[in-house]
Amino acid sequence: MKIIPAIDIQNGNCVRLKQGDFAKETIFNSSPIDMAEKWIDDGAERLHLVDLDGARLGSPINIEIVSSICEKFPSMTFQIGGGIRNLETAEKYLRAGAKYIIIGTKAVEDPNFIKILCEKFPGKIIVGIDAKNGEVATEGWKSISNKNAIELAKEFENYGVVEIIYTDIEKDGMMKGLNVEATLNLAENINIPVIASGGVSCIDDIQKMKSYSESGVSGIIVGRALYERKFSIKEANEIFTK
């Protein structure tokens, strides 16, 4: 299991939102590149980059910033999402140095797109499933679809998707703990590893999730808790080395 610091980019800044509300942002750094360097220096082995403007508007807006981060740290593992709705954008991020690309809204709207991506870029595709009360949200969490998270994930089991990122919108940015029950329910019902996301508040949340590593949970994305120094990447990593 791995700890994956999140760098969410909006209007060129490194921000955190509350429950996916674009109006409820906290700017933590005006330079996402500097933020990436800090997390790498602190011991991160993988980073989660999201173009929030791209997710909301449906096309990459901060692609130059994201690409610059990948190019500056070529040995780092990056997973990138936000507004990736076509092959050209996916290929551009991969050429820039991304190890994985994350598809969210397009995966809901056109599951066959995931199949095409997996065939063209094998071992590179992660699907992001953002949910509220078990129902999948799209377009930067602006819309709630009529698709169930588990049912959607099952559609991708034979496509070659590397991992599923599961985010509970109601937990995200609220520092009230992960939705462990929903995350485990998804992980135990599909054969794709699940990365937990949304709501990590303290080191105890990391400790709790460690015990579920055999249940298909492969990683934890952490945002606000790291930015507000509730614990460090080193402390989190030590939990998995004990």
Image (cartoon, grey):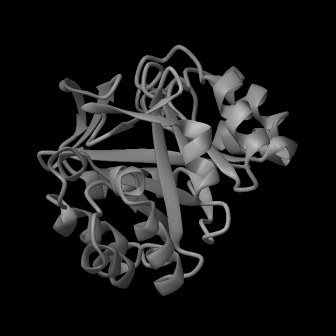
Q: Quadrant of residue 166?
A: top right
Image: 41 above or below 208: below
Looking at the picture, tell me which residue is in the foreground, 106 or 196.
106
Please state the horizontal and vertical placement of residue 1, each as a whole percent of the image: 74, 49
User: What residue is drawn where x is 71% and y is 21%?
Assistant: 204
Quadrant in which the C terminus appears: top right
Q: Quadrant of residue 56?
A: top left
Going by the image, does 108 lie left or right of 2?
Answer: left
Image: 134 above or below 190: above
User: What residue is drawn where x is 82% and y is 36%?
Assistant: 212
Going by the image, does 96 lie left or right of 194?
Answer: left
In the image, farthest residue toward the front: 146
Image: 93 above or below 185: below
Please state the horizontal and vertical placement of residue 31, each as a whole percent of the image: 21, 51
In the image, farthest residue toward the top: 176
Q: Count how many numbered circles sit on residues in the image.
A: 0
Image: 40 above or below 148: below
Residue 198 visible in the current orientation:
yes
Please state the horizontal and vertical placement of residue 108, each as a whole percent of the image: 40, 50
Please state the horizontal and vertical placement of residue 85, each as a whole percent of the image: 28, 64
User: What residue is drawn where x is 56% and y is 81%?
Assistant: 122
Residue 196 visible in the current orientation:
no
